[in-house]
Image: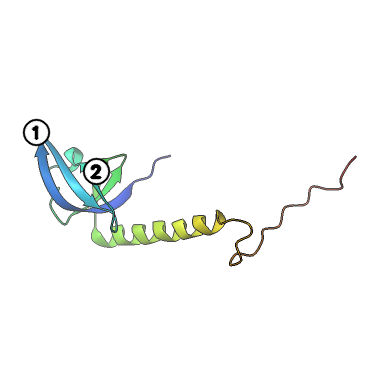
Amino acid sequence: MCLGIPGRIVATTDVAGLLMGTVDFGGITREVCLAYVADDAAIGAYVIVHVGFAISLVDEAEAHRTLELLRSLGDVLQDELAPQDDPVRPPRHEPSRGPATT
């Protein structure tokens, strides 16, 4: 399984003939290889990035929908990984394992 994250190109540069760019992922920026989308890569364009490579372009509305979904999943995961004794989070109940044996 792979995960592509949408981001907006905020800068581009040529590095030894390879198009690279700074991509903003909702406030976090990373350097990304834009070679696969070089013909359409422009500042302000949205791209899907997988392991440091922009693999396709995506429209702005879809990028925002996907980022919002990823944020909400992050919130769910954070809730699930919270310590058991967190006063804000109700304790989880362990599934019954049947009668104890000695």
Q: In x, y percent, where is residue 96?
A: 78, 51
The reply to whether residue 85 is in sight is: yes
Write down the quadrant of residue 2 in the picture. top left
Please tell me the numbered disc located at residue 54.
2
**Element carrying mark 1:** loop
Q: Amino acid at mark 2?
A: Ala
Residue denoted by label 1: 17
CA separation, marks 2 and 1? Answer: 16 Å
In which quadrant of the rendered image does the N terminus lie? top left
Tags 2 and 1 touching, CB below 8 Å: no
Q: Of callouts 2 and 1, which one flags the residue occurring earlier in the amino acid sequence?
A: 1
Write down the quadrant of residue 67 in the picture. bottom left
**Element carrying mark 2:** strand
Q: In x, y percent, where is residue 58?
A: 25, 53
Q: In x, y percent, where is residue 88?
A: 58, 67
Write down the quadrant of residue 21 in the picture. top left
- Which residue occupies the foreground of this view, 53 or 79? 79
Way the structure is coloured: rainbow
